Amino acid sequence: MDVIKWGCAGVKGNTAAKERTIFDHAGNAIKTEDREIRIVAKYEEPLIVVLGNVLSGEECDELIEHSRERLQRSKIGEDRAVNPIRTSSGVFCGENETITRIEKRIAQVMNIPIEHGDGLQVLLYTPGQEYKPHYDFFAETSRGSANNRISTLLIYLNDVEEGGETAFPLLDFSVFPNKGMAVYFEYFYGDHQLNEFTLHAGTPVIKGEKWVATMWMRRQTFRFS
Ligand SMILES: O=C(O)CCC(=O)C(=O)O
Ligand SMILES: [Fe+2]
């Protein structure tokens, strides 16, 4: 089985040194097979990267149209329960030519085989809807932690009129939705405090709709496609 092994130790045996990251792209751009993606901003530890033009406008529109009719109230946790923590609607995308191409690009950006992913999920928030502060990884005591999540890519599919930022409250850092842009973050660190700093929220939308596509990656193969 394919296992991701990053985050085991500090570099060069120095415990104060930065842990290795999964996302090891150097410079200001990522050249994937079919698109050059700009690195717009970076927060170093935990690593949070804002990415420009991950998807074209047409790809964003296509994902929204593909999902609009099939949305269901979002659920959370390993039991997939409806919960007031998360009031958006969502759908896991099936496969078609566009989605396969997008997933291939996402795997290159996240530097992990797509089979480690939960699948591409599209979410819609209308005014008042939100995802309250949470972690994308499962607690050590939960069943889901046997093959825990290690990184997230959140792609904004539209410009939101007002509200809907992705906020990292422990870092006083927020990302504003911009069509085609994305925020990447990872939480596989041996230093648990770094993982805990990735607490994040989708703040309430105030005006307009907010559409996002999320990819969560696991430490080991998760989806067999
Ligand atoms: O909508 C957002 O900005 C955050 C979404 C999120 O945290 C998630 O889907 O795990
Ligand atoms: Fe999240």
Image: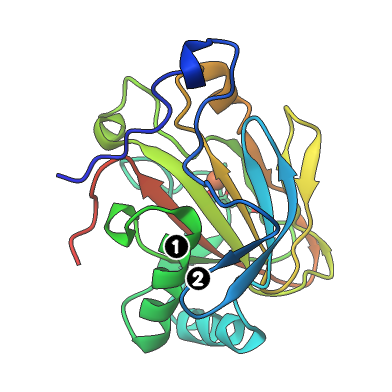
- Image quarter (top left, top right, bottom left or bottom right) of the C terminus: bottom left
| Residue at figure coordinates x 55%, y 81% from the top left | 64
Badge 1 element: helix
The residue at which mark 1 appears reads as 108
Whichever of callouts 2 and 1 sits on the residue coming sooner in the sequence is 2
Tell me the amino acid under the disc marked 2: Thr
Left or right position of 7 against 3: right
Tell me the amino acid under the disc marked 1: Gln
**Separation of disc 2 and disc 1 at Cα?**
6 Å
| Residue at figure coordinates x 50%, y 31% from the top left | 20
Q: Residues within 10 Å of mark 2 (few under 14, many from 20)?
A: some
Q: Quadrant of residue 16?
A: top right
Seen in the picture, residue 22 relative to 113 is either above or below; the reply is: above
In front of the other: 100 or 142: 100
Seen in the picture, residue 148 relative to 183 is either above or below; the reply is: above
| Residue at figure coordinates x 47%, y 54% from the top left | 110
Seen in the picture, residue 93 relative to 163 is either above or below; the reply is: below
Report x, y in % for residue 155. Answer: 60, 64
Left or right position of 179 against 89: right
In front of the other: 98 or 67: 98
The residue at which mark 2 appears reads as 32
Badge 2 element: loop
Q: For the view shown, which residue lies furthest in the left direction?
A: 1
Report x, y in % for residue 122. Answer: 50, 68
* Res 143 seen here: yes
Left or right position of 192 against 61: left
Report x, y in % for residue 33. Answer: 46, 76
